[in-house]
Every structure is written in C-alpha cells, then in structure tokens.
Amino acid sequence: MTTKIDGFALVALIGLALFSLFNLLGISFQFFLNQFTFFIVGFIALFLTLKLGIKNVQINARLIYLSFIGLLIITFIVGDVVRGSRRWIDLVFFNFQASEFLKPFFIIFLADFFSKSKISTRSVLISFAYFLLIFVIIVKQPDLGNALLYLGVFAGMVFFAGLTARYYMYAFILSIITSPILWKLLKDYQKNRILSFLNPQIDTSGISYNLIQSIITVGSGGLFGRGLGLGTQSRFLFLPENHTDFAYAALVEQFGFIGGLAVIILYAILFYRLLLVLRSVRDNPFHFMYVSGVLLFLATSFTVNIGMNMGLFPITGIALPFVSYGGSSVVSTMIMVGLALSLNLPR
C-alpha cells in the first residue's frame, strides 16, 4: 500500500499548522510547545491512515462506534470538570476528549450504515436512535456546540443518503413549534450567548463581553497585524479563550487581514482537494458518504467558528480545526482527513 499524499492538501495542512503554531507562540510558549507535540502526533496519524486505509475501520464500524459511546459514558462519570464541563479524561500527559476522537468514526459508522441500508423511514429512525445516544451524552457534559455540530453533520449525511426535502421541512416546523420548550431546557449561559448575539450592547461587560472583545480583536489587527506576540487583546487576556474558541481572532490581531485571508485560502485549497476526492469516489456509496461527512464537519466548523469570531454567529464553543489549540482535535481531524485522502490512492 502506498502512503503518497495529495501534495496540495499536504501544503494546506502544513500551512494551517504553521499559522496555529505561530499564533500560539505569540500567546503562550507553553501552548506552542504542546501544540507542536500535538501536530507531530497528528501528522504521524495522518500518514498511518494513508497507509492503512479505511477498509479495516469500516469492517469494525459498529463496534468502534459503540466503544466510543462507552468512553463518553465513562467521561461523563469520571472525567475532569473544567469550567463546568465534564469532557476530558486525564491521561497524565494528555487530556483525552472522546467527543473529538469520535468524529471520524461517527462519519464512518453513518457512511457504512447508509451505504448498506436503503433510505427509508425505518433506516432513518434507526440511524437517529444511534445518533441520539451520543447527542444526549454530549449535551449533558455540557457541550452544546459540539452536539449541534454532530446534529448538523447527521442531518447532512441523511440528505446525501437520499432523504427527501419534505422531511427537513417537517423537522423545521417541529423545531419552531417546540422552540419555547427547547429554550427552557437551555442553561443560563447558553441563553446569554444567544441574547448577546441578538443585541451585543445588552451587557458589554457581562454576557456580551466575549463577543465584543472578539470583534475588537479582529478589527485591531488592521491589514498586516500588530506582529507576533504584540497583540494586546490576546496577549493581555482581554480576549477570553484566545487559544481555542477565539484563536482566529487572536491570529488576525497578530497577522492582520492578510493572515486571516491566508488561513481562509488554505482551507479553500483543502476543501477543493477533498471535493476532487468526492468526485472520484462518487460510484462507491460508502466512500462517497464518508468524504461528504468529512466535508460537512470541516466546512461547518470553519464557517461557524470564523463567523463567531467576526460576530456573525452566536458563540457556540466550536473550535477551528487545525488552528485552535487542542490535542484531541488535532489528532482526530488528521485521522479524519487522512482517511478521506486515502480513498484517492491506488490500492
């Protein structure tokens, strides 16, 4: 088996990794060192998935998926609590986040399921039941942003599997009808994120603080940025979560509009190369569904995170893949992309 990789995709991944590392170097040297290690492991995982391919994972898709449900339950019971959320298991040298590592295997499971099952009310309900198992646990952690990301990818993959548009209309109408109930189920900080998005001036030093600071940070970068380590908003912690949720805002402050645009261009290259893979595997239902799921995950995360950083979307807690700090995110996303790129290689 070959480990040759799409050169353009590799350049995009290396470019995003470098932007992430330099951004973190300007914020915290410790974050930089940690992320550097994460990327080493991530690129090793990328090349391993290129070599091994997706077939062996597909064969064990259901077992792996159910195993991750078990890990999510274990995390919910014994995981470390960080800022009110129980999402990580402390492995001494590494904080393992099961909901992140699940992502590529969630896509594989759904791709395998829909490639073997004709789309019908029964198959959709069965797949929804499997999905609901992880959705409820992730919501209860609580991690509403990731839960909604999974929901969006599930809905998109069901659409690619052939579900007609009228069912989405039914779901939309149902969500409108039940919105008062859903609102009551939200935690106070989740409600505040929505309220601050609708009216950022409602409480600029309270519930709207993160959103306002993110917009200020993006604007303060100008065309060429303040320079590495010279971003006052991110360096002096006026911008919360400057290495995770708002890493893109911190990056634009340091490297300006040009730096922010470069990141978007690198993403565009990666998306284009994945679209070429999608076109090449369109005759294989499983491969087509998998690459579709990868594109849905990446494009949704990219759009929501950058939109959130620019004040165009409510704050959700969805990270920017390859740019935001985090070992679980880096390694799992490298695995996800590596498996997709492997489908375009001769076997």
Image: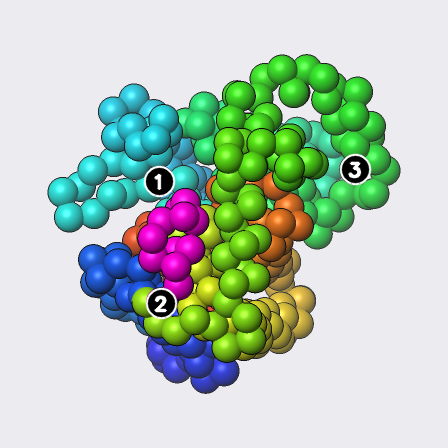
Disc 2 packing (10 Å; few <14; some 14–19; many ≥20): some
* 260 relative position to 21: left or right: right
SS of the residue under disc 3: helix
User: Which residue is labeled 1 in the image?
Assistant: 98
SS type, badge 2: loop
Q: Quadrant of the N terminus?
A: bottom left
Instruction: Check disc 2 and report the residue beneath it.
Output: 230
The answer to if 237 sits in the magenta stretch is yes
For disc 1, the neighbor class at 10 Å (few under 14, some 14 to 19, many from 20) is many
- Residue 6 location, x and y as percent? 47, 80
- Label 2 to label 3: alpha-carbon separation: 47 Å
For image coordinates 25% across by 36% down, the residue present is 89
Q: Residues under labels 1 and 3: Cα distance?
A: 29 Å
Q: Is residue 53 visible?
A: no
Disc 3 target residue: 168
Q: CA distance from mark 2 to mark 1?
A: 35 Å
Q: Position of residue 329 (x, y in %)?
A: 38, 52
Vertical side of 132 occupied by 227: above or below = below
Q: Which residues are magenta?
A: 230-241
Kindly identify the residue that appears in the image at 60 percent across and 46 percent down: 153
Does residue 199 show up? Answer: yes
Identify the amino acid type marked 3. Answer: Tyr
